[in-house]
Image: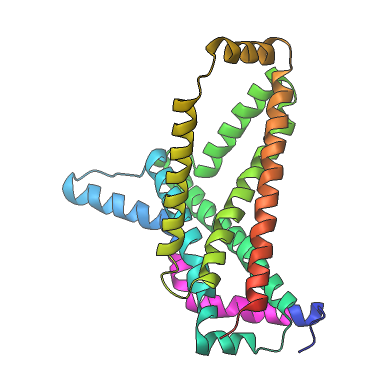
Amino acid sequence: MNNTFSFSRFGRFFLYDFKRWAVSYGPSFLMMCLMPAVLYAIVLVTGLVFSQNWSSPEIISRTTVFAIVTSLLLITYPSNVYGFLTDRKSGSAYLMIPASVGEKFASMMANVLLAVPLIFFSVYLSVDALICAIDSNCGPSLLAYAGNAIDFLLHFGDSLGDGPAAMSVNLFWLYLNFCIAILYFLLCAVLFKKHKLLYPILIIIGLNFVITLIAGFVFTTFSFDGEFIRSIAYKIINEWNVGTSVTVYNILCTLINLLATGGLAVAVYFRVKTIKH
């Protein structure tokens, strides 16, 4: 197989790859996208049956369900859609498809980092907004609620200076966190032959445990001068521009997340390139 990248061949493979996961994972994905309607129906029916009242899900419950469904998508999509690559039969058949590794990897990234979040967030937030427009008892939609939070942060940032710039970095930072999470589970899906959900979760638990032990050891072993910490905080508040400091912090976090995203993507590429059965 020619390993050069062909855009026309990539386009055909991407359509094939998209249709493949739409058939296999599509029902679960559609259920996640329509979860606002499912939640509304459950709350409504429950209220009518047990209290004979017209009940509607409020913003707190809708936000909680949105966070849970997004987490489920991040965890289950990679293993269900690309976890078969480690299987001897189906994985070998996928690798034998006449497309270069670069084209297969680009298709994988286009689905994982572009198509999935674009479709999911667009449909989910649109359904939630439609329900809130029909039933005012639901309160503000998730999109409007997020807009109010962003507006608050922008005005708060304006009072400090460089607010809009800091917020724009934060929005991109949130997307990068989504990319890091889904790429992590994608790497585990194509890396482990079994327990594609259990192992990555155990790794996260183990890393958190190790970090907690290290942090506890540092804080219990070394004494920190409270006056020194207060002097640093005083200098930041009174001598430096707080808005600029926040912006610099956000930029550093974004750069770190970019490196993490790129590193995970490179790891996935070499795993797909070197996988053998």
Please state the horizontal and vertical placement of residue 252, each as a whole percent of the image.
70, 37
Specify whether 241 is left or right of 54.
right
Query: Which residue does the image show at 66% across and 28% down from the upper left?
Result: 154
Magenta span: 11-31
Q: Is any part of residue 72 visible from this angle?
A: no
Quadrant in which residue 108 is drawn: bottom right
- Front residue of 160 and 204: 204
Please state the horizontal and vertical placement of residue 272, each as a whole percent of the image.
64, 75
Q: Is residue 183 above or below residue 100?
A: above
Number of dots carrying numbers: 0
Q: Quadrant of the N terminus?
A: bottom right
- Front residue of 58 and 230: 230
Main structural element of the magenta stretch: helix, strand or loop?
helix
Q: Is any part of residue 147 visible from this angle?
A: yes
Residue 130 is inside the magenta segment: no
Query: Which residue does the image show at 51% across and 90% down from the upper left?
Result: 89
Please state the horizontal and vertical placement of residue 62, each as a whole percent of the image.
41, 45
Q: Quadrant of the C terminus?
A: bottom right
